[in-house]
Amino acid sequence: MDTHVSTQTPLAALSAHLAGMPPVAAMQPQVLEWRDGMLCLGAPLAANVNDKGCAFGGSLCSLMTIAGWGIGFLQLAEAGLDADIYVADSRIRYLKPVYEDLRVEARLDIAGEGAADALDLAGALRARGRVNFRVESRAPLADGGVAAVLGARYVAIAR
Amino acid sequence: MDTHVSTQTPLAALSAHLAGMPPVAAMQPQVLEWRDGMLCLGAPLAANVNDKGCAFGGSLCSLMTIAGWGIGFLQLAEAGLDADIYVADSRIRYLKPVYEDLRVEARLDIAGEGAADALDLAGALRARGRVNFRVESRAPLADGGVAAVLGARYVAIAR
């Protein structure tokens, strides 16, 4: 088990983890909320702006992908487990431009394939040493619209 | 028409464009090759590394998405056209970790839906003021393997 899981809160460990990866740190992400299985990350528009003055699609995609990763990390860390978590594949739709600070929300997909594992990631990881999970992420806008949606599949492998 | 299309080569304009977006500049991308309809971009691993010492998935995704964008930009710029180009959706599969500098190659998808437009992007844009196109990108490895593949759909709208 990784020592920083036991000496920091899982949320602090997640923030430290994001800050430790150069391409992620460049986006200046912040953990805004982790509640009822929903992880919300934010990032300033200025660090993630494209040629049109709105959010770069790659930043939205990265932030949503990380949010999904973060859910797996937090759920397992809160159960005292440490795992290597990899994104396997994802699908993203860009719906509207983002002219404000970026915000993404991610939730485990507990309806589709692998739903039983999603309801107990820690139990599945303990039982089999690895677990697949799916996450649905979205980028909500201040006006109530949705800028982008991403569905991604991850695998966690016990260390 | 954007003046820098007429005063720079399209390739120089693409490089300037990438350097002008903060989240893209942070990845330190370079245009390595543009030949026979294939655009190859590279980026140093050090600027794009994750917690496992290999390439951050978001960087791979961003670089492949930009490479597809770049193909549309270059094809239209070489025909003297300037357009706003947006990514509409994409699907990515992460196949192998990348422990070397990142390299991505993108090609127009001229086999699927919209193939006729893909064979003459400039003509379609001139005729209708907008054109959809699809791009297949991949991240080849030095050992001959493939680290990731991405299929993405874009729309170009004449300025």
Image (cartoon, coloured by chain):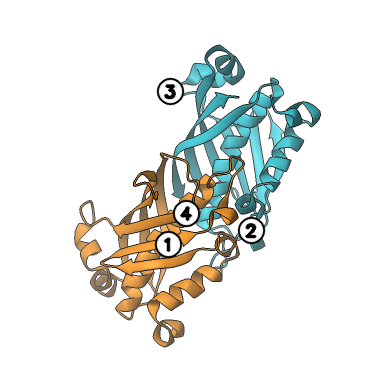
Chain colours: A orange, B cyan
B54 lies above or below B36: below
Q: Are marks 1 and 3 on the same chain?
A: no
Q: What residue type is labelled 2?
A: Glu
Quadrant (top left, top right, bottom left, bottom right) of the N terminus of chain A? bottom left
Chain of the residue under label 2 = B
* Residue assigned mark 2: B100
Residue A77 image point, x, y percent: 35, 76
User: Which numbered dot is residue A75?
Assistant: none
Q: Which amino acid does label 1 sit on?
A: Leu
Disc 4 and disc 1: Cα gap in Å? 8 Å
| Residue A103 appears left or right of B69 | left
Please tell me how crowded label 2 is: few (under 14), some (14-19), or many (20+) other residues with Cα within 10 Å: some
Q: Quadrant of residue B12?
A: top right
Please tell me how crowded label 1 is: few (under 14), some (14-19), or many (20+) other residues with Cα within 10 Å: many
| Residue B156 appears left or right of A72 | right
* Residue assigned mark 4: A102
**Of callouts 4 and 1, which one flags the residue occurring earlier in the amino acid sequence?**
1
Q: Do the residues labelled 2 and 4 touch (CB within 8 Å)?
A: no
Q: Is mark 3 on a helix, strand or loop?
A: loop
User: Which numbered dot is residue B113?
Assistant: 3
Query: Mark 3, mark 2: which one is toward the viewer?
Result: 3
Query: Mark 1, mark 2: which one is toward the viewer?
Result: 1
User: Which numbered dot is residue A41?
Assistant: 1
Residue A157 image point, x, y percent: 37, 68
